[in-house]
Amino acid sequence: MSDSPPLLEMRGITKHFGSVTANAGIDLILAAGEIVGLLGENGAGKTTLMNILFGAYDADAGTIRIDGRPAAIHSSADALALGVGMVHQHYHLVPSHTVLENLMVGQHGSGWRLNQRRILRRMEEIRYGYGLYLDPSVLAGELTVGQQQRLEIIKALVRGARILILDEPTAALTPQEADGLFQAMAAMAENGMGVIFISHKLNEVRRITTRVVILRQGQVAATVANDAGTSRRQLAELMCGRTVTPPEKRPARLGKVLLTLENIHTANGTRQGLKGIDLSVHAGEIVGVAGVSGNGQKELADVVAGVLMPSGGRMVVASKVVAEPSPKTMQGLGIGRIPEDRMGTGLITTLPLASNLVLPRIRERRFSRFGFLKLGAIRQFAQNRIAQFGIKTAGSAVRAGTLSGGNLQKALLARELAWNPRVLLAAQPTRGLDVSAAGFVHEQFLNLRQQGSGVLVISEDLEELFLLSDRIAVMFEGRIMATLPIEEASVERIGLLMAGVREAA
């Protein structure tokens, strides 16, 4: 065993936000050449801990050592100077600048001149050392989501990162892009770097990490070696503190077609237009829509929800042609909607939770009359839904914005399922949710399917789509490349279709 100190040593890290303890005496050790998985439910303290390491927060107590030496990290500049890099879920790039120009932001030069040659030379080293390459002359705004992430990783390496934090890095990648990322991570470890990998995808954690640290309620619940003795189920139980049972998916019992899209087009504008979309959803089935972000999924969801008017084609709901779709019309036809942006589009975070739970139906006589709200009926309805869906909140009068991500999603489900939708449209329904919260959402979808409704799930998480779907439609550049029965689908085939390889169909 080597006598050299760990690459990173965090001891007794504690952080309070008012009366809430986000981190309570956390220890985290990272050796050179190691990939450590960091797991935990939403609110377990993972992001806070990494923000302390990257200088976004100051710890209230505890110490950080890098290469055995005390490290004072009070800003991202301090972290970068000490060799700590972080790739966030939301990238920090300048779209109108080239790849090279983005890499040069914050770099020191000689006098008034920046050293482009040094950056280009380092890009070549990264290309051959880790298999990560981008054309330095391409605008960042023209890169795919996967390429943008690659640019963020290259940027961290150019700046000298020896410790790399990756926060949910595969959320918007094709399987092939994820494979490339894992190969790069393995090469980093071989070259003596240390990587901290944060993910809710337990199969990926099992695949790539050497050791796993699990946080629960701001503390280290367990540290386990990622070997044959550690299972996916064990990791899930350590995260949640209880047995986690996947929801049961029974054989499909297809009924009549509830939703049909025929040759749907949308005007391009500044977004990815739809180009002849044909899609159907039957009673008693879940149709999944796969694709890399930005390939028309948002536009598809907006058309079905009545938010975006098609420029061509026809939409039919329960045998009724929808001539002039609008949110109110689609709601009246039985289309429930869980939007991708739950805090921006789904809920009004400044309003009480009770108001949010009745908002789409506020004009119904049950909740108002002659312009006056029936506050007692609203409160009783909200309390019933909160209890039925296990929403963790201090009460129906609290602001919706105070709820965690998982509880916000439960609130959306509680609202939409209260009206027994014919078809439920769910866009990115478990993005950012932990295993327990995601399992609850999946169970609701499968229950709805069993009751004879149709569910349209748009997701960038292939594991989720394979778990839920009876058929998977794959989108690329505004088109559906193929729609495959789940029995004929494979991760490799779906991944190629997501990348635009039509021959896979």
Image (cartoon, helix red, strand yellow):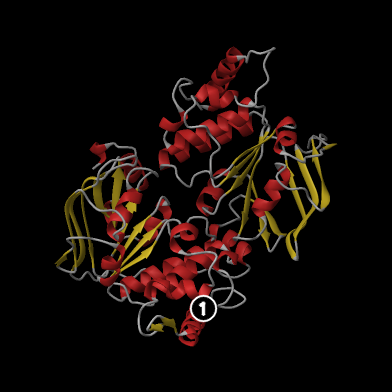
The residue located at (25%, 43%) in the rendering is 267
The residue located at (77%, 41%) in the rendering is 74
The residue located at (51%, 66%) in the rendering is 408
Residue 30 sits in quarter = top right
Q: Position of residue 497 (x, y in %)?
A: 30, 41
Residue 117 located left or right of residue 494: right
Split into 4 quadrants, where in the image is the N terminus? top right
Q: Is residue 248 visible?
A: no
Classify 10 Å Cα crowding around label 1: few (below 14), some (14-19), many (20 and above).
many
Foreground of the two, 378 or 463: 378
Foreground of the two, 143 or 356: 356
Residue 223 located left or right of residue 357: right
Q: Position of residue 31 (x, y in %)?
A: 72, 39
Q: Is residue 395 visible?
A: yes
- Under circle 1, the secondary element is helix
Foreground of the two, 488 or 176: 176
Q: Position of residue 139 (x, y in %)?
A: 45, 26
Residue 25 located left or right of residue 150: right
The residue that label 1 is drawn on is 386
Q: Position of residue 464 (x, y in %)?
A: 42, 57
Say above or below: 140 vs 430: above
Tell me the amino acid under the disc marked 1. Ile
